[in-house]
Structures are given as structure tokens and as C-alpha cells.
Amino acid sequence: MNDVDSKPNTRWINHRITAHRMRGRGQSLDAIADYLRVTPRSVQRYLELPCPEPLPDRDEVELSSFVVDGACAAFPEVDWLSRSPLVQAEAKAICQYCPVLDKCRSYGLNKGRDQRGVLGGMTMAERARELRRQRQRGSQQPQRPGVVARDQGAA
């Protein structure tokens, strides 16, 4: 089995989820097809299959799985929760060379987005800006006029 066959087709799964959600809200096959940019026959095939479980948006990272390996563990004197710009700059400088920076940033942008202090080299305000930027990038895809989808799903 090659590598492509071993991974689920994310787009196909997301289309199935969206088709089921839109159909549950009373959307017609044609409206769903227009939204997904597929044929009505494809939508019919999606709906013939059971609705799959949603795919995780991001890798879930637990703080306890990496915090002991982080550079922050070597600097207990730094107040990682401080609101002082000087202390935050010092904490971010330590994060710059951290071996688990990516995991910590992922945690900060997912589960720790409402925690104050520095996580993954980003302050709470920087994490909020990055999350807004990510949402805006996702919403810049053109919407089809005439299709009403309040919870657009994962497609």
C-alpha cells in the first residue's frame, strides 16, 4: 500500500461532513453541490455514507508532555506570566532557542490561547493576533452567493 492510500482523503471526509450538516439544515442537493463545488451526484454519494467523525483541526498537545524539556525549565527565576514588556521580552528571548518551541506554540495557540504570559515565544496578545490572522486566511476563500450556511463545517 503506498503512502497516499494509507492516509484518509481529508478533503473527501470534510466534504462528507459538510454535506451532512447542510442537509440537516434543509439545504438542497444543488445548494450543497454549489457550496462544495462538486456535482449533485457527488453530494448524493456523500449523503449515502454515514457522517464521519470530524478530523482534528490541529495536533492536540498537552503541556505536561513537553514542559520539562523546554528551555523555560532552566530559568525558574523568570516570571513567564508577567505582563511587563521587559520581562516578556526576556522570556521570548529564552524561547527563541527552545527545543520544544513548536509544541509549546501549538499548545499556546490551541489550549493555552486564553492564558496570560509567554507560551511558545508569544504573548497572549500575539497569540490572539495570530489566531485572528489564521481565521482571516481561512475566510478569504470566496463564498458562493445564495447559499446560507451558518455553521459551515470543516470544508
Image (cartoon, rainbow, N blue to C red):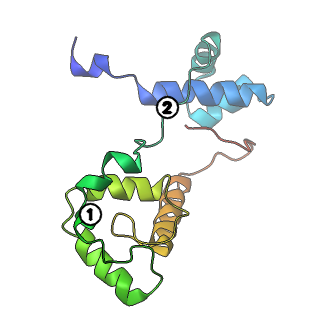
Camera-side residue: 128 or 6? 128
* Image quadrant in which you'd find residue 95: bottom left
The location of residue 19, given as percent across then percent down, is 64, 26
The amino acid type, in three-letter code, at marker 1 is Ala
Q: Regarding mark 1 in the picture, which secondary structure is present there?
A: helix
The residue drawn where x is 33% and y is 69% is 121
Indicate the quadrant containing the N terminus: top left, top right, bottom left or bottom right. Answer: top left
**Amino acid at pointer 2:** Leu
Q: Is residue 74 above or below residue 153?
A: below
Say whether marks 2 and 1 touch (CB < 8 Å): no
68 or 84: which is nearer to us? Answer: 68
The image quarter containing residue 92 is bottom left
Front disc: 2 or 1: 1
Which residue is label 1 attached to? Answer: 73
In-front residue for pair 125/68: 68
Looking at the image, the residue that sits furthest to the front is 77
Horizontal relation, residue 152 to residue 89: left or right: right
